[in-house]
Image (tube, coloured by chain):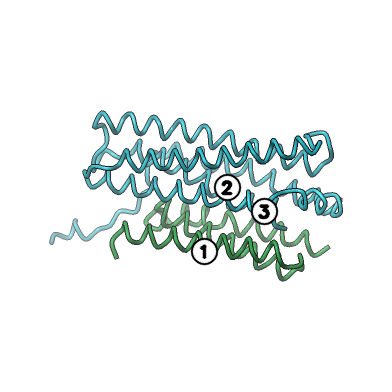
Amino acid sequence: MSEARLADSIWILLILVTVAMAYFGENGAVTFLAVVLILSASAVKAFCVVDYFMGLRKAPRMWRFLLLAYAPVIGVIVGVTYLF
Amino acid sequence: MTAQADIQVKQLPGDFAIWLFILAELSVFALFFILYAITRLRFPEMFAEGQAQLSVLAGVGNTLALLTSSWFVVRAQQKVHAGRAGGNVFLLLALMSAGAYLWIKSTEYQHSVALGFDLSTNDFYFFYYGLTAFHMFHVILGMLVLVLLMWQNGRGKYRSGRMNEFESGASYWHMVDLLWLVLFPLVYLL
């Protein structure tokens, strides 16, 4: 797949996940499972942006890890606050 | 093929300095996100009531506008790197998408203010206005960066092997997108 087609595919995926996430968030009750699912979807979107839009899939491991870890780490901290 | 050609050197796109700046920005926002989550824990009813007043549709619109803008920047970068025409067209489309974000956000603010909610209403609105306005400031700064990239690209400054400045600007723009991907579910959905 060419880089252009790859970028197009990632964009379509991001749009679909965003719409699905919003529909789920708007129509479902805010249970802990819903929180986990929404934060996970957000992390997947962040992975796509970091690896394919920022182009860090070809970057040094440490930098890639730092950026990829951002959304999941915030997600875990936020998720934990919903346990109380 | 030589042995040297086989070696793939992994490197960051753009200047190293922009990545230090991006890390600093992400850290500041992370602090605000965590403070928001802790404050929500203390006042769950207040935050639920505040969120119920927000338009999820507007939040989705903001997300789609920023994701689309980031996608256009990727396509612009690919065009410029390949030495093909059309880079500035994609940058212009990216700016228009960012403009759509600003329009949606200003409409949201007008609606909230019309309902009588401002920064001093309660902790939820303090975070809502504070976080989203701080993020919007980054969007506006990023739009200025995109205009600069368009101008320099128009002058023929960028081509394969001379993409450092373009990649730095694009990376900043994608960071703005990345921040919104965390902010949107936190403030609008959860």
- Mark 2 sits on what residue? B62
Q: Hey, what amino acid is under mark 3?
A: Val
The image quadrant where one finds the C terminus of chain B is: bottom right
Q: Which residue is the site of mark 3? A: B56
Frontmost residue, B171 versus B27 = B171
Q: Chain of mark 3?
A: B
Describe residue B7's horizontal placement relative to residue B119 as left or right: left
Instruction: Provide the residue designation for mark 1.
Output: A16
According to the rendering, which colour does chain B have? cyan
Label 3 packing within 10 angstroms: few (<14), some (14-19), many (20+): many
Q: Which quadrant would residue B149 be assigned to in this image? A: top left
At numbered mark 1, what does the secondary structure look like: helix, strand or loop?
Answer: helix
What's the amino acid at mark 2?
Asn
Name the disc covering residue B159, or none: none
How far apart are the two marked residues, 2 and 1, measured between alpha carbons? Answer: 14 Å
Q: Of B73 and B55, which appears nearest the observer? A: B55
Give the image location of residue A51, x and y in percent: 44, 57
Gap between marks 1 and 3, in whole Å? Answer: 16 Å
- Chain A in the picture: what colour? green
- Measured as percent of width and height from the top left, residue B79 is found at 27, 46
Q: Secondary structure at mark 2?
A: helix
